[in-house]
Image: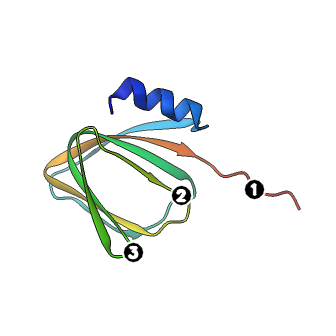
Amino acid sequence: MNQADFANKLSAEGYGETVDRQMAADHFNPEHAHEFDACGLVVEGEMTIARNGKPETLRAGDLCTMPAGTLHTEKSGPAGAHYLAGRRYPAHAAG
């Protein structure tokens, strides 16, 4: 997927915020979760995201989606990673 198609996808699916991120070579983020739904596009390099102990390696043009609250790890490849990520914050029920 290219960046223009990614931007259109995010808009159509209600992602209101997009961040542009870089990860240094072989950087590892330990298990964590986000309070938002995430949709990411790898622009350059590669990164491996592991959920439930199952790693998935993503390269330039690859897309990854993850619901809020999903525990996962992130590791960049030997050349690092540049990625864009859309964030969609779930609505909280009034009550």
The residue wearing badge 1 is 92
Residue depicted at 53% across the width and 44% down the height: 87
By what rule are the colours in the image chosen?
Answer: rainbow
Residue 72, given in percent of the width and then of the height, sits at 40, 67
Do the CB atoms of the residues marked 2 and 1 lie less than 8 Å apart? no
Q: Give neighbour class at mark 3: few <14, some 14-19, many 20+ (Cα, 10 Å).
A: few
Say left or right for 13 vs 1. right
Disc nearer the start of the sequence (3/2): 3
Say left or right for 60 vs 69. left
The residue wearing badge 3 is 52
Name the kind of residue labelled 2 in the image.
Pro
Tag 3 secondary structure: loop
Q: Give neighbour class at mark 2: few <14, some 14-19, many 20+ (Cα, 10 Å).
A: some
Tag 2 secondary structure: loop
Name the kind of residue labelled 3 in the image.
Asn
Say left or right for 2 vs 57. right
Residue depicted at 56% across the width and 53% down the height: 36
Of the residues tagged 1 and 3, which is closer to the observer? 3
Residue depicted at 46% across the width and 28% down the height: 7
What is the total number of numbered labels drawn onto the structure image?
3
Outermost residue to the right: 95
